[in-house]
Image (tube, helix red, strand yellow):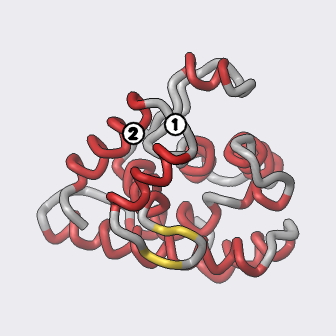
Amino acid sequence: MLSAFDALKLLKDEGCADNVIRHCQVVSEIAVNIARDFQKKGHKVDVQLVEVGALLHDIGRSRTHDIRHAIEGASIGEGLGLDPRIIHIIRNHIGAGITSEEAKAMGLPEVDHLPISTEEKIVAHADNLVMSDERVPLERCIQRMRDRGMGEEAIQRVQALADELGSY
């Protein structure tokens, strides 16, 4: 498993901007806190996977800043031979995931991009709580989704993910 230091080096080596790297660091800090909370409650969670996955979740922003950054990031991860669990975190981190129907409408590969593992869910949720490099309330994230014309189904998934993981 990569270390946090190695993950940050990968972001820099792939050409991610400093603001993207800072965003990833804040998401990682929040995700690790959520993961540790989960552990304290008796849930099994790989905190190191959460930390590294959260650091690398936006590596695709080295190529694009649109919705395809998750697909591009997964492609980068595959090319680098990253652990498949990290690649799943990168691919499935947007919102609370994207269904195959939504993916098709967005011009993405027509498969589900939904977070399945606890680690994937934690990183997706933590990412929802960070705008730029600032932690924001979930309500602000949801309002931003509405302002951007996101569908109600996607918004409901974000809320359901937050409910599943508990108030954080």
Could you say which disc has been placed on residue 150 in the image? 1
How crowded pointer 1 is (Cα within 10 Å; few <14, some 14-19, many 20+) is rated as few
Q: Quadrant of residue 13?
A: bottom right
Q: Residue at x 56, y 17 (%)?
A: 101
Position of 160 with respect to 6 (left or right) is left
Position of 87 with respect to 142 (left or right) is right
> What amino acid does circle 2 point to?
Ile
Cβ–Cβ under 8 Å for marks 1 and 2: yes
Q: Quadrant of residue 15?
A: bottom right
SS at badge 2: helix
Q: Please identify the quadrant where the C terminus is shown.
A: bottom left
Position of 6 with respect to 101 (left or right) is right
| Residue 9 horizontal/vertical position (percent) | 76, 78
- CA distance for labels 1 and 2: 7 Å
Instruction: Please say if 166 is above or below 94.
Output: below
SS at badge 1: loop
- Looking at this rendering, what residue extends furthest in the front direction? 147
> What amino acid does circle 1 point to?
Met
Q: In which quarter of the image is residue 133?
A: bottom right
Say which of 1 and 119 sits in front: 119
Q: Residue at x 24, y 54 (%)?
A: 165
| Residue 72 horizontal/vertical position (percent) | 78, 45
| Residue 131 horizontal/vertical position (percent) | 53, 68
Q: Please identify the quadrant where the N terminus is shown.
A: bottom right
Q: Mark 2 points at which residue?
A: 155
